Image (cartoon, helix red, strand yellow):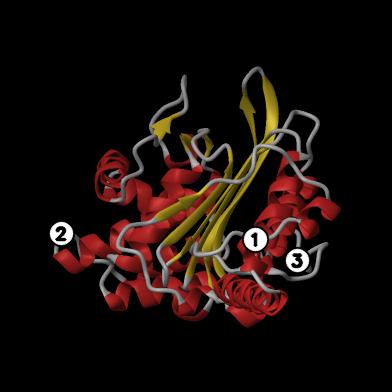
Amino acid sequence: MGSRTHLILVAGLATAAVAAGATAFAACDRTPAERRPASTPITSQPPSASPSASEQSATACSTGGPWDCEQQRRFSAASAFLAKKPGKLAVIIHDRTTNAVWRAGTTRNTTWTASTIKLAIAATLLEWNREGTIALDSTDRSNISAALVSSSNDATTALWSRYGGTTMFNHFRQRYGMESLAVVSGYELFWRNLRCSAEDLYRLMLYVLTDLPAADRDYLVGRLRGVASNQRWGVWAAGPNLQPGNKNGWAQKPDQGGTRWVTHSVGFAGQNQRYVVVVTYSMTPSGSMSGGIHTVSDLVATIFGTPVPASITLP
């Protein structure tokens, strides 16, 4: 082969390599909204090890998946953050535009629901009212609003007692797919004595946003966006630009031979409630309410690229 032919062949190979690299970069840089929605949820699990910041920046993002490069970097940072926390911490993010789902932590671990179950109660009563099974009066509607906005325990107990807790409990499991929802061992069936997993709360929130009639869905979305200051944490840390809404639960409960704080947050963020967001945290006995609330909030802030520590309001 002559030297001129050799030079032409090398130049051609170099041009092809540059073109391939540009194509890969473009694919990696696409936003989720620019991808074709999947027909079924795509689950992405976090890495088993927690990479250092330098390792994360040096690792090229995978191309062709449902999450763009920036979001993959945020997920890596969130996985590293989660791995350092004691107790059982879990997070689920579902992009309803692309139908992609990302999970990290102990998403199937069951723990006390605390006040997150109030969302299931409210959704159930709205459904039954629309179906004609019950007729909500002004007191009921005031109690539903108070249970969601200010997390009123008294309002929730009034609704539970009036409309039959056992029937509601079965509805949660069968209609919303809260398969691992159960009564805490040794306690009576009551809304304050239930336990569930992050997966259960995820299915509940997805049902509210996807399957409820529009008027009932919009009512719940409005209430969750307008929560009182004692619930402006957790999913709230996604930031005002994403118009988040959430139902939080926080309580100190006996569990596994000790007393532990649980700090949970279930809700949504993004235009048209694009992202379903669920974070559950069952702490070790040495944990505090403040520590748990900051942890779930900072995890959400890391995932959505807002400042950490998150700007939140403690109860």
* Residue 66 on image: x %, y %: 49, 64
Image location (x, y in percent) of residue 34:
47, 79
Image point (58%, 69%), residue name: 68
Rounded to the nearest angstrom, the CA distance separating label 3 from label 2 is 40 Å
Residue 148, position as x, y percentages in the image: 50, 63
| Mark 3 and mark 2 residues within 8 Å of each other at the beta carbon | no
In this image, 196 relative to 261: left or right?
Answer: left
* The N terminus lies in quadrant: bottom right
Asked where in the image residue 169 lies, by quadrant, the reply is: top left
Q: Secondary structure at mark 2?
A: loop
- State which mark lies toward you, 3 or 2: 3
Q: Is residue 60 above or below residue 83?
A: below
Instruction: Give the residue type that dot 1 points to.
Output: Cys
Q: Which SS class for mark 1?
A: loop
Q: Quadrant of the C terminus?
A: bottom right
| Residue at (32% x, 67% y) in the render | 210
Q: What residue is pinned by disc 3?
A: 312
- Residue under label 2: 133
- Residue 222 appears in the picture as rendered: no
- From the viewer's perspective, tell me whether residue 250 is left or right of residue 208: right
